[in-house]
Amino acid sequence: MKLVKPKKYLGQHFLKDQKIAQDIANTVDLIPEIPILEVGPGMGVLTQYLLPKERPLKVVDLDTESISYLYEEFPALKNDIIEADFLAMDLNQVFDGKPFVLTGNYPYNISSQIFFKMLDNKEIIPLCTGMIQKEVAERIAAKPGKKTYGILSVLIQAWYDVEYLFTVSEKVFNPPPKVKSAVISMKRNNVSALGCDEKLFKQVVKTTFNQRRKTLRNSIKPILGKNSPITEDDIFMKRPEQLSVEEFIKITNLVEKELQNT
């Protein structure tokens, strides 16, 4: 069967290096036995190393050409190949509400959206691994004080322990992307509740990082308005990139209390 042609509009860059593909597949073993959902299998370079793990495996791809290729090359997966937009899927239906590992060589143009969807389904995704753009991986894994620390860092690290595993050269892809890639692991931590209003927490994080060069005293104004007395607290003199997840939780509780009093 002829090979699948990479499609720019889908952000496809097909990995050619078998050793790297095997190393990525092995990241799912951090949590063994539970099912695996692979996003964007393409021509199955990662799929071929996931299949021998003898765990329930499903793959989802939006590309009709890739779907046809997978049917031909992986007959054992015939009933587990899903032609769909991952971002539009109800993930509770994939394995009947059971937890699963999410993995893949993720399309670079939607990787952040994939991880926001992971967060929305964190109760059934105890582990997410895979390959993404190096810059995005560095942002997710960044610690407070780093320039790369931002919205994704805080929201993901609130719920997951993040590990930047290794960097991948652009030379091992067809076509080669213009950037380097990285393999990352995100494993659910022991947090079952943040101790604050989670919706407001997201709003505070996103609002303050949208003006990341300003101190919180100024960047929080879209939520609290001008001259809010709580912004006299020393913590509001910091910039968002200086704050830990715990400090964002503290600020969220202060903001909620202030909003209730106005």
Image (cartoon, helix red, strand yellow):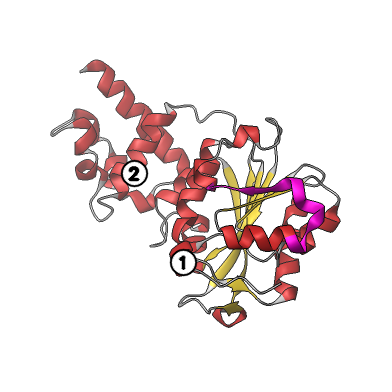
Count all numbered tags in the image, as a single digit: 2
Give the CA distance from mark 1 to mark 2. Answer: 19 Å
Q: In which quadrant of the rendered view does residue 165 lie?
A: bottom right
Q: Is residue 136 left or right of residue 215?
A: right
Above or below — where is 41 with respect to 16?
A: above
Q: Magenta stretch?
A: 72-85
| Residue sitting at x 59%, y 77% | 173
* Pointer 1 local density, CA inside 10 Å: few below 14, some 14–19, many at least 20: few
Residue 37 in the image: state x and y as whole percent: 68, 48
In the image, residue 170 lies at what x, y percent? 55, 79
**Quadrant of image for the N terminus:** bottom right
Q: Residue furthest top?
A: 261
- Mark 1, residue position: 135
Q: Three-letter amino acid code at disc 1?
A: Glu
Check the image and report above or below for 72 versus 170: above
Taking the spot 53% from the left edge, 67% from the top edge, the residue there is: 12
In the image: residue 210, left or right of residue 9: left
- Horizontal side of 123 relative to 179 (left or right) equals right
- Label number found at residue 206: 2
Determine the image quadrant of residue 203.
top left
